[in-house]
Amino acid sequence: MSATGRILAEFASLPTRRPLRLLGASGQLGYGIPTPAFNAGLEHKPDLIGCDMGSIDIGPYYLGSGNMATARESTKRDLRKVLVAARRHDIPLVIGSAGSAGAAPHLEQTLEIVREIARDEGLHFRLAVIPGDVPRDILVEAIRADGVIGIDGMPALTEEEVAAASQIVGQMGMSAFERAFRADIDVLISGRACDTAIFSTLPVLLGFPIGLSVHMAKIIECASLCCIPGGRDSILATLDDEGFVLESMAPQRLATPISVAAHSLYEQNDPYVIIEPEGRAELHEARYEAVDERRTRISGATWLPAPHITIKIEGSRRVGERAVLLCGAADPRFIERREDILREVAKVVRDLVCEDTEEDYSLFWRFYGIDGVTEKLPDAPTPGEIFMTIECIAPTTARASEVVRTMKQYLLHYGYEGRLSTGGNLAFAFTPPEISVGTAYRFNIYHIMRSDRLDELFPITIEQL
């Protein structure tokens, strides 16, 4: 019998449900799992080990390119740690959003590493794999049926954007994970998935309240980020029918009522609602009560089923090749006139590099130290120095490099009104200061799709290793 089969059979035989223990091993697998906290979690004999592996926070590049955001070496180290522990203790292991962005290339790279570990460690287990890629024909059908809407101001999705996307994924929810759990498995690895599904599916399947399960899952998928001080050490949730208790497995991290409640603001437009494909958890009546200095008990979340299943869809398309110029400036006259100077130099560069061809690139610049992260307040003092990134996106690497190299030379020596020294306007931390950084992508799909074809969207395959 597999790890999930064992737990399902155990709970089916109990006259009353015992508390369920779930270990959030990593806030994002591949960046390192602190061993002391993880081992401390294993001593509590968890019923499930879960790891979120992906995020949209990393931007459109990884989804578009198919590359992992984490280094292969550290990813393999983390995967080995959780996989060996799960099999040694016969605990189900669930990994969501494989390989950073959860598309087919990311899932396959993750599975390749898992198979290597299984061979190296002599592990044998039943593996469920759920891809998260959305077939383009299904998405086009939904567009034509007015079943797709944009999120956060995204324009209406067009068939042209669907065709242009390098990868398209959908965030699967609990229903796909539930089908996998019922297939008698030891390990589940999915493509793009709701973070909550990693931890909420098993308790819901066992009969625990859905609202509590989803609320718990939303917190522990970030490991000990909800603690003071926040961190990425493993966290343990102990769930019963009335609530759950959170405890970081790192002794220096405290899960307090305020710190846990504040986590409701993380990645949420509304701190009182957690929206999932199947419905939403309502936190308006949630209560956060200290058990002791390090632990908090949470209760009160309820569940409201959705009238229709909806899936969040993400897609990324190539916009060109990118090169950047990295430099600094300390002349107060240059800093004061920075925008005018950059625009004037950009015109000089355009006249030079477009002398015998059309203008086929875009230039962008940001001034760190003054308004690179936030807009400069009207009464804020002008800094003594700034750092600049000047970015070019062009059809080819060679073209982008040509533009930023020309920009560097003319910006370095540009004569602007009030300049006192001709020695150079810029400072460089290293050479070359212009760098080709590869293909640039943008999110072109960030929408909600209504669909009742979940089995078709998220098929499950079983592999015996």
Image: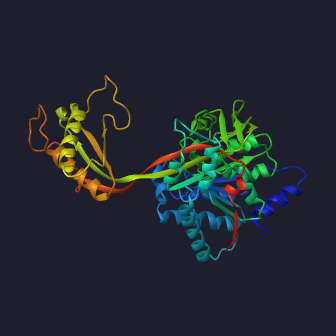
Q: Nearer the viewer, residue 398 or 379?
A: 398
In the displayed structure, 34 sits above or below 386; it is below
Quarter of the image with the N terminus is: bottom right
Q: Nearer the viewer, residue 245 or 359?
A: 359
Identity of the residue furthest to the right in this view: 15
Where residue 452 sits: x, y (%)?
Answer: 72, 48
Looking at the image, how many numbered discs can be counted on the residues?
A: 0
* Nearest the eye: 205 or 350: 350
Q: Quadrant of the C terminus?
A: bottom right
Q: Is residue 426 visible?
A: no
User: In the current view of this chain or complex, which residue is farthest to the front?
Assistant: 144
Query: Can residue 412 be seen in the rendering of this structure?
Result: yes
Relative side of 66 to 40, left or right = left
**Residue 433 image point, x, y percent:** 24, 53
Give the residue displayed 60% in from the left and 77% down from the top: 119
Q: Residue at x 20, y 50 (%)?
A: 353
Return the x and y of residue 12 as percentages of the image width and height. 87, 56
Q: How is the image coloured?
A: rainbow
Asked if 40 appears above or below 423 in the picture, the reply is below
User: Would residue 138 be found to the left or right of residue 349 on screen?
Assistant: right
Which residue is outermost to the top? 379
What residue do we see at 52% from left, 58% from top? 32
Left or right, 349 with reference to 202: left
Query: Residue 431's spot in the image, x, y percent?
Result: 22, 56
